Image (spheres, rainbow, N blue to C red):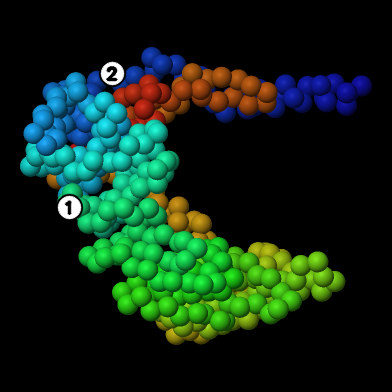
């Protein structure tokens, strides 16, 4: 009877414990009592600028001259935009009646101009503005496929190229080969008769195409080299498990295996590719539980088997010397996976420093809701914060679950 009572009471007990972990919080409690005063800087967001407290708001692109015709803000619709903070440019895709156009506004010089008459499309939202540290690529991902390449200072570089943006390169992989535009050059084409493309990887001035065969392409010279070290034996298949590029070398973990065979060997190799040459840096042989790669600077840790098992072996490969040695599990724990490194690289800087001021966004949950064995905050209040030197933070603006923390695209003195 006691056991039965406990079984009935346990869910209620767990729900009570879970609910206690999220304290009640209401909208009135998250709204700040006061906001900071403007310091003279300008906050840019979309097609607007204002002081950092949201006052003195004004539109940026208010007119556009196309040919000999001038259009006011009421004559066009802004479909999308992209800020280039390094050059103070805003690229816009606008719609004038059924016509899609690319234009720009420089928020330092306050100058704007029409840049390009984009081909008609079924849906203007299919046009995307993609930006790297070298190029601006405007591409229609719907129909018809189209792409045009600009510099970050709004200079037209190349037309009619549909592909993918990769840093200073726009590339396309077709049945007939590999085509690319490299910043400062022209469109190039490297033909292939037998390319069965599966994976694209970039490392420095080289592109590597992994498929039925693996090729290294020098983007500067168009030189193409087949990397036969990746070729599988006739009765085996292969799968690329991981890639990592450092100091001009691409490191690859590849698995060779047999499908539908009594022989279930899983052969793992760690291969180093530098330029147009490749060699096996370490052959692990048959590893049923796989090989994983962890990185710490110029050291790559290789885990043979499942982390933490008594049979697992750990290695450290020195990218500078090209040597491999056995290490302890404790040493390997200082490394990070390639997925972790990608997330860190993709994460935007949380704090924007302008002169002596720092701006960043924080958030707090409110409106507690309870569910089965859990409780949570259904809404979020976001705050634009400002810090002056080492002084205490101030709230400049707040938003009640409306903008997901989007307060600005840039903040400047002008």
Disc 2 designates what residue?
Answer: 33
Disc 1 designates what residue?
Answer: 155
Q: Position of residue 91 (x, y in %)?
A: 23, 41
Q: Return the mark for residue 396.
A: none
Residue lying at 20% horizontally and 29% vertically, measured from the top left: 48
Whether residue 229 is situated above or below residue 51 in the rendered picture: below
Whether residue 163 is situated above or below residue 277 in the rendered picture: above
Marks 1 and 2: in contact by CB < 8 Å? Answer: no
Res. 181 visible in picture: yes
Q: Nearer the viewer, residue 72 or 335?
A: 72
Residue furthest top in the image: 28
Q: Secondary structure at mark 1?
A: loop
CA gap, disc 2 to disc 1? Answer: 47 Å
Q: Secondary structure at mark 2?
A: loop
Res. 333 visible in picture: no
Q: Residues within 10 Å of mark 2 (few under 14, many from 20)?
A: few
Q: Position of residue 401 (x, y in %)?
A: 41, 23
């Amino acid at each position: 009877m006691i056991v039965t009572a406990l079984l009935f009471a346990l869910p209620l007990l767990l729900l009570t414990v879970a609910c206690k972990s999220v304290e009640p919080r209401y909208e009135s409690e998250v709204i700040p009592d006061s906001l900071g005063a403007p310091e003279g800087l300008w906050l840019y967001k979309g097609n607007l600028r204002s002081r950092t407290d949201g006052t003195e708001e004004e539109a940026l692109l208010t007119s556009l001259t196309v040919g000999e015709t001038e259009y006011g803000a009421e004559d066009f619709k802004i479909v999308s935009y992209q800020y280039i903070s390094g050059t103070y440019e805003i690229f816009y895709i606008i719609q004038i009646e059924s016509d899609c156009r690319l234009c720009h506004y420089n928020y330092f010089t306050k100058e704007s101009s029409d840049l390009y008459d984009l081909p008609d499309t079924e849906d203007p939202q299919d046009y995307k503005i993609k930006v790297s540290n070298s190029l601006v690529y405007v591409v229609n991902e719907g129909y018809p496929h189209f792409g045009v390449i600009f510099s970050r200072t709004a200079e037209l570089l190349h037309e009619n190229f549909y592909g993918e943006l990769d840093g200073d390169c726009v590339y396309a992989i077709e049945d007939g080969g590999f085509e690319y535009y490299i910043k400062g050059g022209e469109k190039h084409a490297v033909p292939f008769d037998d390319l069965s493309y599966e994976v694209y990887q970039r490392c420095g001035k080289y592109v590597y195409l992994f498929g039925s065969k693996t090729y290294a392409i020098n983007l500067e010279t168009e030189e193409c080299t087949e990397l036969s070290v990746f070729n599988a034996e006739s009765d085996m298949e292969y799968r690329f498990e991981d890639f990592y590029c450092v100091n001009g070398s691409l490191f690859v973990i590849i698995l060779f295996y047999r499908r539908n065979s009594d022989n279930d060997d899983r052969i793992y190799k760690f291969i180093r590719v530098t330029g147009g040459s490749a060699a096996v840096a370490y052959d692990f042989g048959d590893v049923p539980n796989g090989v994983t790669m962890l990185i710490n600077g110029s050291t790559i840790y290789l885990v043979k088997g499942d982390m933490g098992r008594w049979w697992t072996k750990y290695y450290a490969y020195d990218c500078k010397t090209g040597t491999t040695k056995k290490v302890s599990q404790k040493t390997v724990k200082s490394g990070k996976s390639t997925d972790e490194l990608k997330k860190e690289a993709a994460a935007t800087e949380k704090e924007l420093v302008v002169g002596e001021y720092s701006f960043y966004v924080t958030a707090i949950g409110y409106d507690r809701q309870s569910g089965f064995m859990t409780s949570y905050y259904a809404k979020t209040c976001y705050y634009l914060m400002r810090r002056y030197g080492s002084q205490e933070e101030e709230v400049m603006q707040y938003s009640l679950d409306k903008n997901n923390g989007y307060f600005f695209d840039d903040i400047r003195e002008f």
